[in-house]
Image (cartoon, coloured by chain):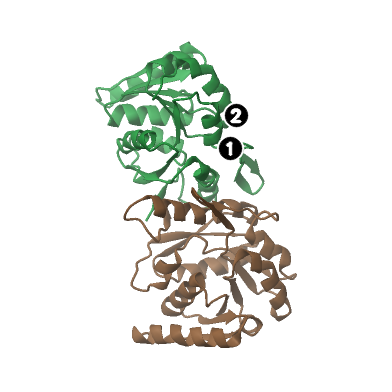
Chain colours: A green, B brown
Amino acid sequence: MKIAILGGTGDIGEGLALRLAADTPHRVSIGSREAENAENKAEEYTTELESRGLDASVEGAENATAAAAATVVVLAVPPYHVGDTVEAIADELDDGDVLVSPATGMKRDDEGFHYHKPGAGSVTRIAADAAPDGVDVVGAFHNLAADRLANLDADLGIDTLVIGDDEDAKRTVTDIAEGIEGLRALDAGGIANAPEIEALTPLLINVAQHNDGLHDLGIQFT
Amino acid sequence: MKIAILGGTGDIGEGLALRLAADTPHRVSIGSREAENAENKAEEYTTELESRGLDASVEGAENATAAAAATVVVLAVPPYHVGDTVEAIADELDDGDVLVSPATGMKRDDEGFHYHKPGAGSVTRIAADAAPDGVDVVGAFHNLAADRLANLDADLGIDTLVIGDDEDAKRTVTDIAEGIEGLRALDAGGIANAPEIEALTPLLINVAQHNDGLHDLGIQFT
């Protein structure tokens, strides 16, 4: 399967691109608003993969080009760019393509990070509202620490939560997620359940900041 | 230390009372609005503890009586009773006593459970706003499945998150929590960080409902 990670030059995009390329048989490309940025980063990631003796590569392209070639498109962009990004690639998406939303809205004050719930209800809902007919949106990969994901020496042994209103699309994303070594994908229901999942990200940052020895935290349901 | 669990006849109260009595040296009492209910349940819990060969007991009393005798008072009551409960026992609290808030607000729709954020910001904040001067409020024990907690045969191996604006009070509650076998207490910062912690409870219920073989779920940060 071809997977495009838009915003793939950013931190969570980097980790997803590296892990998916390293651990799964999928063809991974990253997208950026500037083709050159995407190509340069893709080359970096490929060098990193090859230096580990892995027969894996990552391609780079402008967002719309990357999305056009893919069946699954990950929206690894800041939450306030999710709606615009979906609209910018909408014409490139085919019936049955799946959009994946890993973003969350946060604000920060003296006490720590807090979930900033969008007016639409959740970032996943923003993506769903912007998606063209025939393209389903699935929320996943929210609660992954970017640095830990991007460090292929780091064991994961953590869970990610998958939400969506279409079971087939959810199954597709679950299979992709579980292709990453050490990652278990759990079903957390429909998009209406997104806010509690998106709120895990600021919680994980707060817990990491307040406890010595804990950093790049993940979560396990047990 | 003397710990009173108000609402100790309810499900999360039962689990806390049994575990604290079984695993820690603290003197545990449960409170209820009706003294007789509390006494009957306390007798049940004591019988359960004795049947396991444990030299432990739980006492029962009306809420205010239980609170008066305790240094740490757990508000294991429904979220909409937290403010009233604190007001009802305020005169019985001494300077330095600590209130513990484990409650969370939830609403349910066809998709699952959702965090119902109170106007005050969080249930923990409601308790803090109602607490008399000199009495600190700490949030803890939110993300514990009641049935698993109350079943002394069940291993925990999970985390609870502790929030509060006074470090000494937080330390007191952390020590109590870590006295329960298999429970690790992590610092999640100040009361301003409560909403994301309280939102874990509906999330855990949703995940348990959507995944075969997972029930009475807890969470581990790793």
Q: Chain of mark 2?
A: A
**Quarter occupied by the C terminus of chain A:** bottom left
Which class describes the residues within 10 Å of circle 2: few (<14), some (14-19), or many (20+)? some
A207 or B193, nearer to the observer:
B193
A1 sits left or right of A163 in the view? left
Seen in the picture, residue B202 relative to B145 is either above or below; the reply is above
Q: Is residue B222 visible?
A: no
The answer to whether mark 2 and mark 1 are in CB contact below 8 A is yes
Residue at disc 2, secondary structure: helix
The numbered dot on residue A80 is 2
A145 or B125, nearer to the observer:
B125
A94 or A123, nearer to the observer:
A94
Residue at disc 1, secondary structure: loop
Q: Is residue A102 visible?
A: yes
Q: Chain of mark 1?
A: A
The residue identified by callout 1 is A105
Give the residue at x 52% y 86%: B59
Residue B58 on image: x %, y %: 49, 84
Seen in the picture, residue B161 relative to A194 is either above or below; the reply is below
Compute the Cα span from label 2 to label 1. Answer: 8 Å
Which class describes the residues within 10 Å of circle 1: few (<14), some (14-19), or many (20+)? some
| Identity, as a three-letter code, of the amino acid under mark 1 | Gly
Q: Are marks 2 and 1 on the same chain?
A: yes
Residue A200 on image: x %, y %: 51, 46
Seen in the picture, residue A215 relative to B17 is either above or below; the reply is above
Residue A202 on image: x %, y %: 55, 44
B211 sits left or right of B110 in the view? left
Seen in the picture, residue B183 relative to B85 is either above or below; the reply is above
Judged from this view, the residue extending furthest toward the top is A36
A91 or B179, nearer to the observer:
A91
| Identity, as a three-letter code, of the amino acid under mark 2 | Tyr
